Amino acid sequence: MTGERITQKTHDGLTLVGEAFGPAGGPPVLFMHGGGQTRHSWGGTARTMAARGWRALIVDHRGHGDSGWSAEGNYSYEAAADDARGWADLLGGSPVFIGASLGGITGMLATGEEPRLRARALVLVDIAPKIEAAGSERILDFMRRNMEDGFATLEDAAAEVAAYTPERKRKVDLNSIRKNLRERDGRWYWHWDPKTITHRSGRDSAIMGPKLDEAVRNADCPILLVRGRFSDVVSPEGADHLKALRPDAGFVDVGGAGHMVAGDRNDVFTDAVIGFLEERGIMQQKSA
């Protein structure tokens, strides 16, 4: 299934790039990836949902993939939330919002702070208001290690990913990892602007907790948390904290998966999301 390229211009002049699958009139679903990834991390789930009648839009965050880089380094969570509102407007209706890590923080802010994105549902993929600072810092350490020097070969990049995700039982796919890299002067570099993390630490996400608590309380939509059982970012206590904020929230703990749940166990992840949406009758809702 081939996607349709879609772009939007942000309030600060960046061109953001997305790819849409499925019927134009289908109920919309917006996917936002984690930091250091690209829209291609959602390809399998987006195509499955499109085949079921959804209008699935996968997008590159500002500073990632094919989207523009901010000369001023404007990569705040609030800027990402504004971008998400822009994508929702382009979809022409209240989307299901599916966000992993950075994308999930974006979703919490976009749906819980004014002007609120009116979502049909919010799916948080291994992210919650309360996270483990050590796990978040491990992600940033992984991203920083080869940020400037890149890799001599795709195999070297794959080996780095494999070392970061020891819970994965299958070999890292070189065609898949190629989509997260760009070649320059004979070396391979991650497909994102180093400024997105230059001044960020794992504690930055943790101190967002009270702000995200309030956003989750205010989000006027069903919430599902999908956690990787091996995750060092969202602990069982973090999942319980979300449940205390939103007793109506759904929760799925995916065995054999770490922080990158959709990449580790894509079929299980996709089934969990579709099952939740069907259980809550969300596909049948009319666009706002």
Image (cartoon, rainbow, N blue to C red):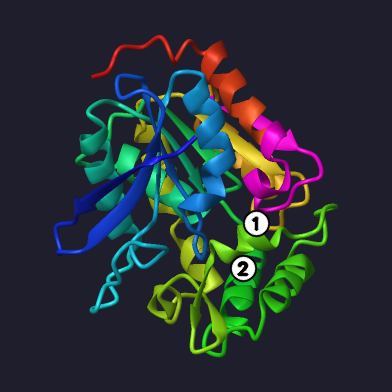
Residue 120 screen position, x and y as percent: 38, 23
Q: Which mark is residue 139?
A: 2
Q: Residue 255 lies in magenta, yes or no? A: yes
Point out the tag, 1 or 2, that comes first from the N-terminus. Answer: 2
Residue 116 in view, yes or no: no
Along the line of sight, the residue nearer the viewer: 212 or 22: 22
* Residue lying at 52% horizontally and 33% vertically, measured from the top left: 47
* Residue lying at 55% horizontally and 25% vertically, measured from the top left: 247
Task: Kindly indicate the quadrant of the structure image that contains residue 44.
Answer: top right
**Label 2 neighbourhood size at 10 Å, few (<14), some (14-19), many (20+)?**
some
As drawn, is 204 to the left or to the right of 229? left
Task: Kindly indicate the quadrant of the structure image that contains residue 168.
Answer: bottom right
Residue 236 screen position, x and y as percent: 72, 44
| Quadrant showing the C terminus | top left
Q: Which mark is residue 98?
A: none
At label 2, which amino acid type do we have?
A: Ile
Residue 269 in view, yes or no: yes
- Seen in the picture, residue 175 relative to 108 is either above or below; the reply is below
Q: Mark 1 touching mark 2, by CB under 8 A?
A: yes
Mark 1 or 2, closer to the camera: 2
Query: Helix, strand, or loop for circle 1?
Result: loop
Query: Helix, strand, or loop for circle 2?
Result: helix
Q: Residue 18 lies in magenta, yes or no? A: no
- Seen in the picture, residue 135 relative to 98 is either above or below; the reply is below
As drawn, is 164 to the left or to the right of 241? right
Which residue matches tag 1?
233
Q: Which residues are magenta?
A: 249-268
Residue 82 screen position, x and y as percent: 24, 51
The CA span between labels 1 and 2 is: 9 Å
* Residue lying at 62% horizontally and 31% vertically, measured from the top left: 270
